[in-house]
Amino acid sequence: MPRLQLSHELQKLHNDLLKLGSMTEEAILDSIKSLKDQDNILAQKVIDFDKNINILEEAIEDKCIKLIATQQPMAIDLREICSILRLIADLERMADHAEDIAKITIKLSGEKYMKSLIDIPRMADLATHMVKRSLDAFVKKDIALAKETWALDETVDEIYKQVYRELLTYMLEDPKKITQSTYFLFICSHIERIADYAKNVCEKVVYIQTGNYNMKMD
């Protein structure tokens, strides 16, 4: 009976985790949409929505701690619960990066962008895709999916380097573009960090199932 109860509680944790992940994905996508459309109302919505993400993150943390105290899980179950505690912290930080992007959108309010935003949204879409796939891998305990998702970070880094070089060129050619270019670089940095957190989730999948963090593809 205790094992059955633990499995039931873990399933509820997974459901809460997927909900938190979905909220985080929404915040990321909305922050980029607000930036691209210069939509301050949507940007403020992202900022205000962050408190809901924090509340759920704290609720999941409380459930994990109570589960460890009352069920005394062993081995793989304990690794999973401890990984969830770290994972929800990663998701909360991803949401913080989305909030920071929304704040930059508001700072850029009224400014005409020096170019159409193409690569930044593409980079954000890929990072958000990594978040979703990494959570799916975690819940399904799918090591292959985790490793495939982990490898996508290389593409995110390539886009980041491309945009960095492009923005640096703008700044060197026209000092008037330095401020806006710097803000766009901050945004790219936020997206790159989101992808890194998604990589962390993938590493946790492998750790739970194998006890190590070896991400090399077989």
Image: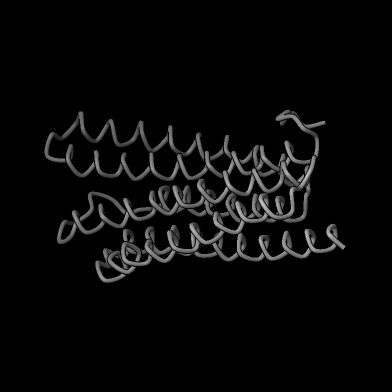
Task: Name the residue located 62 percent from the left edge and 41 percent from the top edge.
Answer: 152
Display colour scheme:
one colour
Task: Name the residue located 77 percent from the left edge and 65 percent from the top edge.
Answer: 8
Q: Is residue 48 left or right of residue 138?
A: left
* Image quadrant in which you'd find residue 172: top left
Compared to residue 37, the image places residue 170 above or below, namely above
**x, y percentage for residue 146?**
71, 44
Q: Is residue 67 left or right of residue 179?
A: right
Compared to residue 51, the image places residue 206 above or below, namely above
Q: Is residue 68 left or right of residue 122?
A: right
Of the pair 112 and 187, the residue shown nearer to us: 187
**x, y percentage for residue 211?**
77, 32
Which residue, as the protein is rendered here, is positioned at the far left? 176
Q: Quadrant of the image for the N terminus?
A: bottom right
Q: Quadrant of the image for the C terminus?
A: top right
Which residue, as the protein is rendered here, is positioned at the far front? 70
Of the pair 78 and 41, the residue shown nearer to us: 78
* Image quadrant in which you'd find residue 53: bottom left
Task: Name the residue located 53 percent from the left edge and 42 percent from the top edge.
Answer: 197
**x, y percentage for residue 213?**
70, 30
